[in-house]
Image: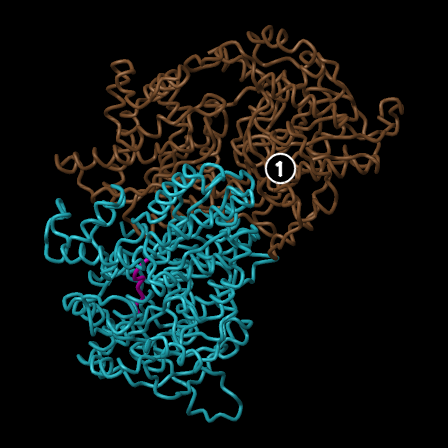
Chain colours: A cyan, B brown
């Protein structure tokens, strides 16, 4: 199997041209005289949890922010890291593939070799499996050649998602020691970066010399906090999906007879659905965060959609497009509670064959009410982060069925006078996850790769690479690093029903900010979107010409002021 | 409702730039001195059916081919159509939306106005519904402005698919007479062009002055014959879908744990699946034409897939991508026979509630064997062309379930030693149908629109606009027209089980030619594709830079020699 990794392959014309695209570096990272400045101690935005976090991360919490700057003429040489001994660095893809991941490796490889040609970058094959089994591939220019600016994680592969149990953590440490790694770079989202922080802490405690560095790479866009503006892959996923949603809108408007219910990938948070809605102006989008905040039941949501269908029919419109984030099912209170009960039974090892009799009376009643297909999906074992298998639960089909039943009822009663309601369901996710990364994701990932080198050259442990001011042109981007533990909140303190892991710090999974500017923009437009079909097509992802330099709307409209964002996050957590 | 049509709308950056793209014209159509040359009488490629066709189309069969050429210096003026009185032309979208449709209207409008500013182009609103109800919108530069080079049929809309019954044909004639139309242009595929031929014949018979012109526009790519190389929309659909399939391949290779079963839109023929496979190199593609030719049962196909999964597992590959054309279900002999029985019961008005008891014993046994979801889908009423509702029948899910059952059996028996088989199913169709058209489709459609004008200026009736030599650069394209009736074959004479409409001529629906070069290319590569993961990503559809000028591989590799193709078609029909 291993011999297939990193092998040069046949590329299409577009792929070939993309391998030749060379992202730029912001001025602060150009040359080999980057200096590091330390700022204030990075404090967690979750004041109530700070004590728990500092207790769990005694070696790695309370470290300062780092900023990487260009060496100015009047700066003493002392501040410049002038010695660059040869280093050995390991890198691993964790979690789900996200477009741009390969460019992190490329950027890091470039930076490592630029500072010392004798340094080595070692990739782990098959994700954490390879990390634990010491299956490696040395990253070279030849290995990288056909993967530059390309999607997927297939240069190295990935398998399992976690480095969390004592056995796994010790296995990772054994590998780092055996391979004499100066640093281990972990590419992933919220969960993998939580694991990275734990590894860093354990390594520090055990006086293992390997420094651990995290990189924010996830298509979900939910690793967002006072130090991280967005994640690698989010832009591409939203562009590829927005194109498809727009195609569906055009299709609906041309055929004038279908309602398309489209479920979007993106895990618990609704960032992808929000960005895609801003890009393509579908008739409706139901954000999980809104539903949770207003405690809407499945029947409330059904009624909202039915009322919209009816209002549109009065304008002689019998078509439409409705976006549903995959995380919605966990935001609907009664479905979440049902999932929690089922999850509890899984945890106890109870067979789910005759589950109804094991559930509380109301959960059993709800379960029996649901159509057969969704019952089976709700019974699937939860993911490693205790969430439901969101990609497998067809909430869009459930809603479409409920809406159809209700519309047929209204039609019979004469309260609805439109044409027979026709829904077609889609799930958009897998077809975007392996996409060729947008220019923005190529650039962002490549720069983050370079930042990783400067973090390890400065000897920092438990930090995440950060690039900020992303909405400005690349030559204004600011590069730095923040302790991962400072991005944590304590689970169970945040909004929503308590989980089984109360009190455990984890990298904060950001929900859509219902007081943010992106959401405000969505809401301002919502009634025109609902009734007037102001569909907009951002077009297929372009690499040259118009649209090629576009960035996410939700990134560009948000306030970039750090302290303002910290404050908002605090207020949010204190609610 | 009508007030929404043709209204200028908010466009994205990419859309705006696309509205400014101006397709070129081949030299033969430049200027206002195009001459027409008539060739041989166009004969149907179906010699056995020619008699039936000529009998059914006495006024419009047996007309010569027309070629539109640049006026050369030494050509007598007589051959140039020098008078261009003001004309009134109607245009209507028929059948399913296909990318590029708007450009046919734009091209026609340009040509009409260039020859006489007093001419009028009248669009029918909501497809054939608007044609029958005389709901119109005059096409102007303002109406066109935001629809140039854009996808969908939403500038005018569409609803029903046919103009076939005596009532419909008379309704269309009444409209043409009431609006004093010199010509009616019908944009559509095989079915709509058959209707166009019938209209032309009826109009000629009734001495109605309106000439009928057809334009080959369908994403299925199945309107292909000795005069027509490809259809408008096919290139875009294949590009958009190939990108998504490639993303799935990258995803499968990155995650290394799923088999993706992807059903492709494209109706009965497998052209879309074939072209997408040539573009993206998935592990397997099962063409309906192969299955029909080899009379493979659903169990044969299941076994083929299972053997492939097993062979891949022996190479430690537990992932893959398999393409399935939506028409496959009608190519599997026993499923086709079952569908025919169900169709027959529908025709007799028999309730399908307790259908099993109404079916023949073997059909009943097969029906009872099938999973519940597919039974319901097979029972749906057939489409207007008597085919099953292919977009609604989840053949990919049926195959995935059968393969899973068999792989679990083999695993238990120890004959299969790979990981547990995991399939995820997708249907790719709706998300591409409304896509922004590729440059090729923009150009092809625009030129066809111009050709329509020259057909009507020459006073031809029952012709289809044709552009050939498409694989060469645009300045080598040849423009002409062929009588639609010469593209017909007689249903029931062609391969496959007899339909209920034996003896009725219809525009030939081309299957994939199993002796053609495109198919040969697919098969040459098939074992590498199956085992070696030589995935290829053509990338997202580009409008500038590399890839922007790409054309379908299946178009470019095929022999363009007319007579050679006629001969092949004849041999094929005689089989």
Give the total of numbered labels.
1
Q: B197 and A284: which one is in front?
A: A284
- For disc 1, the neighbor class at 10 Å (few under 14, some 14 to 19, many from 20) is many
Residue A32: % across, % down: 46, 79
Q: Is residue A36 above or below residue B400?
A: below
Q: B559 and B461: which one is in front?
A: B461
Horizontal side of B133 relative to A252 (left or right) equals: right
Query: Does the stretch in magenta take in B135?
Result: no
Query: Does the stretch in magenta take in A91?
Result: yes
Horizontal side of A499 relative to B41 (left or right) equals: left
Location of mark 1 (residue):
B101
Quarter of the image for the N terminus of chain B: give it: top right
Residue A372, quarter of the rendered image: top left
Residue B149, quarter of the rendered image: top right
Residue A350: % across, % down: 10, 52
Q: A390 and A33: which one is in front?
A: A390
Residue A71: % across, % down: 49, 86
Subunit of label 1: B
Horizontal side of A477 relative to A138 (left or right) equals: right
The stretch of residues the image draws in magenta is A90-96
Q: Is residue B529 above or below residue B545?
A: above
């Amino acid at each position: 199997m291993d011999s297939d990794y990193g092998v040069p392959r046949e590329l299409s014309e577009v792929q070939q041209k993309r391998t030749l695209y060379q992202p730029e570096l912001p001025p602060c990272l150009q040359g080999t005289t980057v200096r590091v400045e330390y700022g204030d101690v990075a404090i967690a935005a979750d004041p109530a949890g700070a004590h728990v976090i500092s207790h769990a991360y005694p070696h790695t919490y309370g470290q300062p922010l780092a900023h990487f700057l260009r060496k100015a003429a009047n700066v003493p040489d002392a501040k410049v890291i002038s010695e660059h001994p040869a280093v050995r660095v390991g890198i691993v893809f964790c979690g789900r593939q996200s477009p741009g991941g390969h460019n992190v490796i490329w950027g890091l490889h470039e930076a490592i070799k630029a500072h010392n040609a004798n340094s080595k970058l070692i990739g782990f094959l098959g994700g954490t499996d390879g990390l634990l089994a010491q299956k490696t591939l040395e990253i070279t220019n030849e290995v990288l050649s056909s993967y530059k600016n390309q999607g997927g994680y297939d240069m190295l592969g990935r398998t399992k998602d976690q480095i969390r149990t004592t056995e796994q953590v010790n296995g990772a440490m054994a590998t780092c020691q055996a391979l004499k790694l100066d640093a281990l770079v972990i590419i992933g989202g919220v969960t993998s970066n939580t694991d990275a922080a734990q590894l860093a802490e354990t390594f520090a405690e055990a006086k293992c010399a390997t420094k651990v560095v995290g990189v924010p790479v996830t298509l979900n866009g939910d690793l967002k906090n006072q130090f991280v503006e967005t994640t690698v892959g989010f832009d591409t996923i939203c562009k590829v999906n927005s194109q498809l949603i727009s195609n569906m809108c055009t299709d609906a408007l041309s055929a004038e007879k279908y309602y398309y219910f489209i479920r979007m990938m993106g895990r618990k948070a609704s960032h992808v659905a929000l960005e895609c809605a801003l890009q393509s102006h579908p008739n409706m989008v139901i954000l999980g965060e809104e539903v949770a905040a207003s405690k809407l039941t499945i029947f409330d949501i059904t009624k909202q959609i039915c009322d919209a269908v009816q209002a549109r029919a009065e304008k002689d419109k019998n078509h439409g497009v409705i976006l549903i984030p995959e995380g919605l099912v966990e935001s609907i209170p009664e479905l979440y509670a049902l999932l929690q009960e089922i999850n509890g039974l899984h945890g106890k090892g109870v067979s789910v064959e005759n589950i109804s009799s094991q559930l509380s009376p109301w959960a059993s009643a709800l379960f029996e009410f649901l159509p057969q297909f969704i019952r089976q999906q709700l019974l699937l074992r939860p993911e490693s982060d205790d969430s439901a298998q969101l990609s497998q639960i067809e909430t869009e089909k459930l809603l479409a069925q409920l809406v159809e039943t209700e519309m047929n009822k209204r039609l019979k009663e004469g309260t609805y006078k439109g044409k027979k309601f026709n829904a077609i369901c889609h799930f958009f996710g897998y077809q975007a996850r392996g996409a060729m990364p947008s220019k923005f994701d190529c650039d962002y990932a490549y720069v983050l790769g370079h930042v990783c080198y400067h973090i390890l050259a400065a000897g920092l442990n438990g930090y995440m690479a950060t690039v900020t001011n992303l909405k400005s042109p690349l030559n204004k981007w600011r590069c730095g690093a923040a302790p991962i533990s400072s991005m944590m909140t304590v689970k169970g303190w945040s909004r929503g029903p308590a989980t089984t892991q109360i009190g455990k710090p984890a990298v904060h999974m950001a929900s859509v900010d219902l007081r943010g500017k992106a959401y405000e923009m969505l809401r301002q437009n919502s009634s025109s979107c609902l009734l007037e079909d102001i569909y907009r097509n951002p077009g297929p992802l372009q690499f040259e010409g118009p649209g090629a330099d576009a960035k996410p709307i939700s990134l560009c409209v948000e306030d970039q002021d750090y302290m303002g964002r910290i404050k908002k996050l605090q207020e949010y957590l204190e609610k």
